[in-house]
Image (cartoon, rainbow, N blue to C red):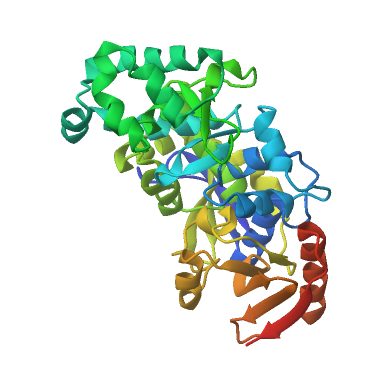
Amino acid sequence: MNRTAFVRYPCDPARMGNRAQLSTTWAAALGWRMERQLLDPVGSESVAGVVRRLGAVLSMDESLAELAVRTRRTTSHPGELADALAAGEVIKAFAYRGAMHYLSPEDGGNYLAIRAAGRQWELKSWVEFYRLTADDWPDFRAAVREALAGGPLTIRELGEAVTAHRAYRHLGPVFDEGAGTLIKPLTWQGDMSLGVPRDGEHTFQRLDDNPRWQGIPELDDAGPRAITAYLRSYGPATVEHIHHWFGAGLSAGRARLDRWLSALGDELVGVDVDGTDALVVADDVASLDSARRSDVVRFLPGHDQWVMGVGTKDVHVTPPDRRDVMTRKANPVLVGGVVRGTWRVREDELTVTWLDEGRRPRKAIDEEAARLSELVGTELRLTIEG
């Protein structure tokens, strides 16, 4: 890798401040990112450590969420993600794109602060529909926290408690229908999170009952911290990657993100990755400088953060002809960090569909198939198609 002298770049979010210009390849960059995301080598982090490393783990499908964590751990067991939630080692809240995600209680407040920045509950459509003005929300939030003081409640139980207040009786029908949209800002603002399900129903609990919870920081503190954490796990990343993750994902707003990038200044370093301008954290330059390509094969669950964290438009991870299947939640087969195929399990049969024109690394596929068999607790019979 070649280095040039420190250079003062033009006033652009991707190139502000004193940056050591580095050059690398996407193969080496993905190898470095595989190590950062505990995929090569597989890590020894705790469940909470894996979630913190990834920033967020989508929890709409619990089996996929657990596999996303377990495949990054050398030793794991079924149900460990649910156990971590019950112990308060991870939290669950509505975060990226309004969906439920596992977050770390230490860093989760940064992402929720960004998500709340748009103050969606103050939109005219919200005010008119829920009949709650911006001035009504502090008392409404307090009523929710009071209702949860005795422990987790289902949405029905929470609705009964909240609508016992005369000011919120009109919300009865909203809670009867699930209150899916109304309750999201309550997690964004740190009033509550999702708890352990009860009889198949979601429960909600106070976040401040969790001793690991660090609270919701000031927005302009949260933004730079979140960007730095993202670059440590998903770098080298372009400014557009950051806008995808925090803009499209958390509605942070382009101007706000650019301001945070500028504020980070010399804490970030510019990298030329096969002609693409990207960023890494300055402290990570040495490890990226020595990074090499990875040839490891990994079977990941659908919508894994490896793919979704940079977006399916990133052709270096997801070639264009594979974008549709990744968007539809197919399980990716990675080779060196690049989507080369998909896999599925039906009963005891594992089918790998090879989507690449290149050579199939049969031995490595066999080894990863054996590893998947251990994770799912079933001896799988492997078939390769394509």
Q: Which residue appears at 79% of the width and 74% of the height? A: 364
Location of residue 161 by image quarter: top left
Instruction: Decide if residue 194 is on the left or right side of residue 378.
Output: left
Q: In which quadrant will I find the N terminus? A: bottom right
Question: Which of 347/194 is in front?
Answer: 347
Q: In which quadrant will I find the C terminus? A: bottom right
Location of residue 141 by image quarter: top left
Q: Which residue appears at 42% of the width and 29% of the height? A: 156
Question: Residue 371: image x %, image y %?
Answer: 81, 63
Question: Residue 119: image x %, image y %?
Answer: 29, 29
Is residue 276 something one can see in this rendering?
yes
Above or below residue 341? Residue 62 is above
Question: Residue 340: image x %, image y %?
Answer: 61, 75
Instruction: Decide if residue 144 is on the left or right side of residue 88.
Output: left
Is residue 220 something one can see in this rendering?
no
Above or below residue 173? Residue 352 is below
Q: How many marks?
A: 0
Above or below residue 113? Residue 140 is above
Location of residue 324 by image quarter: bottom left
Q: Which residue appears at 45% of the width and 11% of the height? A: 146
Question: Residue 352: image x %, image y %?
Answer: 67, 77
Above or below residue 74? Residue 133 is above
